[in-house]
Amino acid sequence: METLTTMDTPTTIGLAAAATTAGAYALYRRLLPKPIPGIPYNHAAVNSLLGDIPAMIRENSDSSGAEWIVAQAKKHPGPLCQLFMQPLGKPFLLLSDYREAQDVMLRRSNEWDRSDWSIEMLSGVGASHHINMKAGPAWKAHRRLLQDLMTPAFLHTVAAPNIYDSVLGLIQLWDLKAEASGGRPFSALDDIYDAAMDAVISFSFGTAFPHRAVQTQLKSLKDGGEEVLEKAREGAIDGYPIYFPRAAIHETIQATYKASKSIGEVLEFPRARFGWYWKKFVTAEREATRIRHTYIREQVDAGVERLQARSHDEAGGEDWVRSAVDLMLDRETKFAAKEGRDPVYWSPTMRDEVLGFVIAGHDTTSTTMLWGLKYLTDAPAVQEKLRAALRKAHVGAVEESRLPTAQEITHTTIPYLEAVIEEILRLAGTLPILERQCNRDTTVLGHFVPKGTTMIMLGVGPGITEPGPVVDEASRSQTSQAAAKERGIRAWEVEGMGEFRPERWLTGEPGAETFDSTAGPMLSFGNGLRGCFGRRLAYVEMRIMITLLIWRFTLLECPEKLSGYGAMDELTRKPRDCYVRLGRAA
């Protein structure tokens, strides 16, 4: 018996090794990405457990991840392809057809909702924010809490004056820097971020929040006097920008900036959940979260005190409202009374909705404004035409040698200004990709799509800023075809699609143009039920910022090495740099 066992041992080991190898190989094959039949994909991806991730890293060293995704849409034939962007994960669809993307978001929201991928990516900052929820009763309750924040009353009487005051602070800072720079360019990145942050903080919390970013920089330069400015000038080299010292900003503002950066950092992980898990052990991350939650709690508590001390008129007026928090607390009071319960003023819902309002209100607008400054700098003819249109519309301000007021800006329609804003939004790609996930088996352009599939749609690229693929009309959804028959098909002329031409948004004879917001494809705010909640606020912010900056300054040409359009990914697609060389507008 011992002899038999000894003789069989090598055979047994060999068989076990072969079985283990075969089993491991079978498991490996089973874990490899499985493409959806009939839709193009990168063949190397289906032979790697990491899918497209190695190629994305290898090919993406000098560009943003979003730009790599746009490149994939152009790499494959047709308007639909698939990517494997998560280890051991399902394929993502990539749709590069504007009409079908619009149809999915606008007319098929019952089957396409917020994706698990997006929720995983954003929930590390505000898990209870409505953007991280599927559509349903809870999501609707969150949106109702915010519904007053996009009314004309709030936008014109609360938001606009605070935005205006923040931009005035930026103008004071840039007046000082323009004089000190001696015609040299300087970076606008931090200044625009700060001005947008001051604006959103002001209309979110009112005067109860004492800290501001732009005023901190302005005070630092003024207190430093000529010595600080002279030191900055001495360090400048011809042909290169001048760098001004940056004063430390308050920890509450710094912690708010950190939220957007953290989202960008987790994008570098194969799965966002791994990034958020790692960040739980990072001391600086935990401290930033603590600071954000603490100051928001303080502002909500201050708002409750104002709410309880208010004296409404008999008609229930809201003249006491001075901030977004005031309106949200008032709305919670009304909901509680209607539902027969005590109001809950402090909760994860209130905390994360306030935080999300601040982060989104700052980050998207500041990023878009930075791209706008670059486009306007590189298009002096557009800049001059815009300035002329502004001064023609605001005659009183011209006659009195002053800036237009906030009320004048928000209550005056200037078609060319609207066209400039829309063209900046179209080209900027602040949110270059949009996403949805299907909650049932469905079809897209004639292809079967299984339940749970995430689909990415492009906010820039084919069909919007460059020619898109030809699509067989018969392959489109019935709702897409019906919309085309009812409303017609809007598309940009192929020539010059990627150029900055605000005139494409205008109709009518010269001198009597009107702005047409539906002139052609644009998805900067998404669409439909899950479209951008803050769209109206973004337009108010941009209208005020562009009007005042172009009224006051001429954006002079910068050296080519400072005028690139490279981008980086955080919460938004940001320019790597943005320099301005300012002259005083005549």
Image: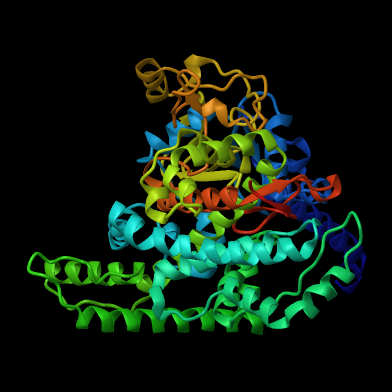
| Residue shown at the point (91%, 57%) measured from the top left | 238
Residue 410 placement, left or right of 242: left
Colour scheme in use: rainbow
Question: As drawn, which residue projects farthest toward the left?
Answer: 314
Q: Position of residue 297 (x, y in %)?
A: 40, 82
Residue 265 in sight in this render: no
| Residue shown at the point (83%, 59%) measured from the top left | 241
Corner quadrant of residue 367: bottom right
Q: Position of residue 215 (x, y in %)?
A: 58, 74
Residue 129 placement, left or right of 79: left
Q: Is residue 543 above or below residue 520?
A: below
Q: Nearer the viewer, residue 354 or 311?
A: 311
Q: Nearer the viewer, residue 146 or 312?
A: 312
Q: Position of residue 25 (x, y in %)?
A: 77, 50
Q: Nearer the viewer, residue 176 or 481?
A: 176
Residue 486 in sight in this render: yes
Q: Position of residue 106 (x, y in %)?
A: 39, 36
Q: Quadrant of the N terminus?
A: bottom right
Corner quadrant of residue 248: bottom right
| Residue shown at the point (48%, 15%) measured from the top left | 474
Corner quadrant of residue 121: bottom right
| Residue shown at the point (79%, 48%) measured from the top left | 558
- Number of marks: 0
Q: Is residue 509 above or below residue 323?
A: above
Q: Nearer the viewer, residue 544 or 182?
A: 182
